[in-house]
Every structure is written in C-alpha cells, then in structure tokens.
Amino acid sequence: MSVVSKVRGFFYRHKNKFVVGGALISGTILLSKYAQHRLKEWKERETIEFFDRNRKQNHFDSIVKTSNQTFSNFSIALQDLISEIINADDIINQLTKNPENKIELWNNLKVLVFTKVGCLIYSTAMLAIFVKIQLMIIGGYLYKDPNSVPTEVQEKYLSLCQNFLNFGVKKLANIIENEVFKYVGILDLTKQLKLSDIESIYWSVQVSLASNKDGPIEQLRKYILTDDDLPNSSDIYDSMINDTADFLDSDEVKSLATHCINQGFNLLSDQLAEFYTKDNVTSTSDTNDPFTNPFDLTKPLAKLLPLMNRSMGKQSFPQLFVQQLMSNNKLQILSANVYESLL
C-alpha cells in the first residue's frame, strides 16, 4: 500500500474527528475575533465615557467656582444693604452724645440689633441658595447645548438676584423686625442675659417666622421671583424661570434653607461665646475652676448690643458665614442635583 493510500485511509477513518475539530477551531477563531471586536468596542465606549465624565466634572467644577465667586460678590452688596436698611450705627452714634431721649434710643437699638443679626443670617443663607440654583441651571443648559442660552438671556436671568436685593431683603427685614419686637421689645436693658437666653430668643423668632404666612422659608420663591417674572411663554428664559420656581418650591430646598439658617445661628453662638468669656462678666460658676463655661456667664443687654452690632462687620461674622456656606456639603449636593437634573 502506497503512502498516499495510507494517508487517504487515515483521513477516511477519522473524517468525523477532523470535521468536529475543524468546526471547533473555526468556532474558536470566530469567537476570538468577536470577543476582540466587542472588547475594542467596550474600550472605545469606556474611553468616550471617561472623557465625557471628565468634561462634565470639569464643567461642573467651573460652575461651582463661578457660583462661589458670584455669591461672595453679592454677599458684600447684601451686607451694605442690610446696614443701610437697619441702621443701628446711627443710633449708637447718637447715644455717645448722651441725648435726652437715650432710653427711647436704647429701646430702638435693642430691636434693631437683634433684627440686623437675624436678617443677615436669613438673607445670606437665602442668597447662597438662589445663586447656586441659578448658576447650576445655566450650567446644565449650556452643557447640553453651548448655544442654548444667549449671553443677554444669562444676564437677564442672573439679574433676578437683584430682585432679592431690591425688594426681598426689605420685606424680610420688616417681617423679622416684627417678630423680634415680640421677644426683645419686652426685655429690660439691665437684664442679665446668658448665651442660652439669646439662643432661645432667636429660636422663638425662627418658630414664629416658620408659621408666618409670608415667612422666608415657606415663601422662599416669592423673595426672588415676583409675579411679573412668572413665565407666559415657552422660550428658553421662561423655561429657566420655571425650573427655578420648581426648585425653590421643593421640600428639599426648603429643608436646606432651614439647615443653612441654623448653621448661621450656631456660628453666631460660637462668636458670642468669645465675647462672654472676656472681662467684665459675671459668672455663676466656681471661680476656682480654670475652665470658664460661656453658658454660665451673663452680660447685661445694654452691653451686649454694641458687641453684637460690631460682630456684623464685614471682616467678622458675615465673612465667616459666607465661607461656611461656600463649603457647605448639603449645598454642594443641591448644586450637583440641580445640574444633573437638567442633563
């Protein structure tokens, strides 16, 4: 038998094995090529998503930076406005001249100082929320379509914060003054106040404002959006106004506003604690104790008022509060939620 015949016989006897083996090899090659193709597609998709995430994160970080700077700039104007609306300094200057109506002036001063502090805390927290929401709405629209919001529309939309400064703050100051008068107007100027007494006064004011029909938390939207601002068409500006109104009316934002306001009053307590531990205070604690608990100390209301008013200077409490709000984690989460909701 020739070699050719032997080879032919071998293939004939094992032809099924060769068919199966060939099919397996061919299938393996095809599967390998398919897997390589799918792996290439997955890598390409992952690369695109990676760059998209980076682009989105960079864009978001840029909006956060812009919103912080915008908030900082507006907060300076806000502080000047509050000092103008609630002019406690003028009364203090009059009192230095020992006028005949000094008792009347002192009684006016105690209401104005407590009102000024409360108004600054409320309005700064509200301004932070307004600015964050507005900048994130603009950012969300621009990320989807860089040409969707013309510059003039952006300027018109951002000018809504001027509504708050022009009308909202004055309305807020009047409401807070009315509530403060209920709790501070009855206090004697010689009354010794503990730090906990001041906290109790402001807690009572917060509770009263929460139940007020024009309260700044429940009616948050109306402090920045007037009836004339409400949309009457379907253009991009009105869509942004609708989005703003929806966010400001949401329970999430109202809860956040309360959180930020509480943060402001906590910071106020920390600052006042430093005043209480200075000289010329009366303590109910053991004088041999090297630690002085500020909550055990008292100050007469008349001495406390100038200290509280002075703490409202730009380089003191207001600046610290603005910095705290800019790094507030819950505000950052709100910013991310607003931004993502528009993508």
Image (cartoon, grey):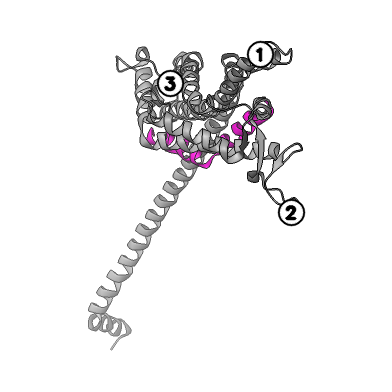
Is residue 77 shown to the viewer in this render?
Answer: no
Q: CA distance from mark 2 to mark 1?
A: 41 Å
Q: Which residue is mark 3?
A: 223
**159 in magenta:** no
Measured from the top left, where is residue 238 in percent x and y?
35, 18
Marks 2 & 1, CB-CB < 8 Å contact? no
Marks 3 & 1, CB-CB < 8 Å contact? no
Q: Give the quarter of the image for residue 211.
A: top left
Q: Camera-side residue: 62 or 325? A: 325
Q: Is residue 332 left or right of residue 16?
A: right
Q: Residue furthest bottom?
A: 1
Q: Is residue 191 left or right of residue 155?
A: right
Under tag 1, what secondary structure? helix
* Amino acid beneath label 2: Asp
Q: Residue at x 41, y 34 (%)?
A: 254
Query: Magenta residues, as a range?
Result: 314-343
Q: Residue at x 22, y 78 (%)?
A: 16
Q: CA distance from mark 3 to mark 1?
A: 28 Å
Query: How many numbered marks appear?
Result: 3
Is residue 251 shown to the viewer in this render?
Answer: yes
Q: CA distance from mark 2 to mark 3?
A: 49 Å
| Disc marking residue 289 | 2
The C terminus is located in which quarter?
top left
**340 in magenta:** yes
Q: Camera-side residue: 295 or 137? A: 295
Q: Camera-side residue: 248 or 85? A: 85
Measured from the top left, where is residue 40 in percent x and y?
42, 52
Q: Which residue is mark 1?
A: 90
* Dot 2 or dot 3, earlier in sequence: 3
Q: Nearer the viewer, mark 2 or mark 3?
A: 2
